[in-house]
Structures are given as C-alpha cells and as structure tokens.
Amino acid sequence: MNPLSGSSRPMKIVGYVAMLLVLIVIGLPLYWVLVTSFKTPDMVYIQPPAWWPEPVTAAPYGRVAENVPFPQYFRNSVIITGVLVSAKLILGILSAYAFVYLRFPGRSLVFMLVLAALMVPNQITVISNYALISQLGWINTFQGIILPLAGVAFGTFLMRNHFLTLPFEIIEAARMDGCGHLKLLVRVLLPMSWPTVVAFGLITTVNEWNEYLWPFLIASDETVAPLQVGLARLISTDAYIDWPMVMAATILTITPILLVFLLLQRRMIKGLTSGAVKG
C-alpha cells in the first residue's frame, strides 16, 4: 500500500478549494463587468446589487460609439501593438542569437546590462523619456508612443535561454553544411523555436495592448490614442458616470486580446516550459 495514498485525498481537496478561490477572485470581477454592460444606468445604484440585468439591454454598447470615436481608438491600438510586437520579436530574436552564437568582447557584461534593465520599472524612466520625446517634437505621434516602449530585455532573456537548450550537434552540422548566420537562424533555429516565439509574441501582445500610462502622457487626442486612453476618457469628471457604457467599452477593449490569448494559450505554455526539462 502506498504510504502517501492516505494524504492524497486531503491534498486534492485543498487543491480544488484553492482553484475555486482563484476562479472566484478572477472570474467574479469579469462577470460583474459583463453583467453591468447590459444594465440600464439606474440598475447600477440599486441596493442590494442586481446580479442579473432586468431588463437586458445592449444600449450601453451603442452609447460607446456615440460618446467616443471607438473605431479610431481600436485602429490606433492595432497599429501600436502590431508595430511593437513586430519590432520586439525581431530585436529579441536577433539579440538573443548574438548573445548565444556570436563571440564579441564584453558579451557577458552587455547581457548583465540587459538583465539589469528587467529590474528597472518603466515608471522610473517616464520623466526622462517624456523630456526626450518632447525635444524631438514627437508629442501626439505614433513614433513618440512606440519608440520608448520598444525595449526588449525580457524577449532577449527568454529567447537566449531557449537557444541555449537547442542541441549543439544540429548547430554544428548546419555550420558544416555551409549555413551562414542568417540561414542558420531562419532555417534551423526558428523552426525548432516556434512555441517559444509564439509565447514571446503573445506575452508582448498582451502587455502592449494593455499599456496605458505612456500613451496617456503622449497622446493629446484620438488621432493616436489607443483604446485604454479612450476608455479612461469615458469617465467624465461630472458627478454622474454612465457605468453600463464604461463597462461595455471595457468588454469591447478586452475581448480581442482575450480571444488571441485563448487561441494561443497552449502554444504559450509549451513555449515557456520547452526548456524546463532537458533529457
């Protein structure tokens, strides 16, 4: 008889309880946002709170388009996120390749500087970055939003660690066959690295789509402002706030990135754990 079998059932119960608590903590706020987006404004303030809208109405979603240029904000978010994800993927993969497969003076020191950048919160560099962007005349421009966010320390760290787990024999065989650096990267390394690349791209997509502070400081109007800035502008300074409209805008903002995450989550988990076990 397994001596651990007696303790397995209590541990399973504890595990299920923990998962239930996590589900409540994460799922309950999302459920409340979704339900509130289908309420009438007067239902938000009733006591006790109504956990189901009566009547159910989609009018708050129509009011979103009436109060803010939502398609414009959505277009701006797609542009900013798309450019940043593309730039970070390219820079992260190329820099990781250089740290693993190229020999140059000070390589270890440069990589330590990259690691140090991971420990510096973005908020610390806001003032200096804003001063630089202002001097360049890039306030309220896409380049003013994109360039300061294009740092790729995390991607370099992730891809470098993955490249170190790849079989060295395959790399040597490719070099003996005459592969240069570009061909080695494109035809040998990347086909073996797609799960990690997808994980890197998905994490970057989520982070950049949800970026708020820097675009809020740089964007003066809807010409370059992303969805998060537009969502904040829905909350007026008046005493009355149309909370169903705000929640409807929130649902419209998080739905695209939530769908992307649900579609690619399996590849993301595989990519993040690909180097965890090395046989």
Image (tube, rainbow, N blue to C red):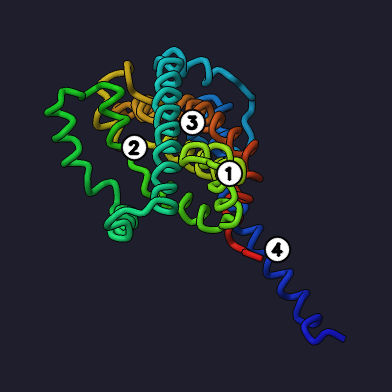
Name the foreground residue: 48 vs 73. Answer: 73
In whole angstroms, how far apart are the C-alphas of marks 1 and 4?
A: 53 Å
Compare marks 2 and 4 and give the one earlier in the sequence.
Answer: 4
Residue shown at 32% from the left, 60% from the top: 108
**Residue identifier under label 2:** 150
**Residue identifier under label 3:** 250
Residue 96: percent from left, percent from top: 42, 48
Residues under numbered marks 2 and 4 in contact, where contact means CB atoms less than 8 Å apart: no
Badge 3 amino acid: Thr
Badge 2 amino acid: Ala
Residue 114: percent from left, percent from top: 32, 53
Disc nearest the viewer among 3 and 2: 2
**What is the secondary structure assignment of the residue under circle 4?**
helix
Name the foreground residue: 123 vs 275. Answer: 275
Q: Say the numbered circle drawn on residue 177.
A: 1
Screen quadrant of the N terminus:
bottom right
**Residue identifier under label 4:** 16
**What is the secondary structure assignment of the residue under circle 3?**
helix
Residue 139: percent from left, percent from top: 20, 24
**What is the secondary structure assignment of the residue under circle 2?**
loop
- From the viewer's perspective, tell me whether residue 158 is left or right of residue 138: right
Screen quadrant of the C terminus:
bottom right
Whether residue 119 is visible, yes or no, is: no
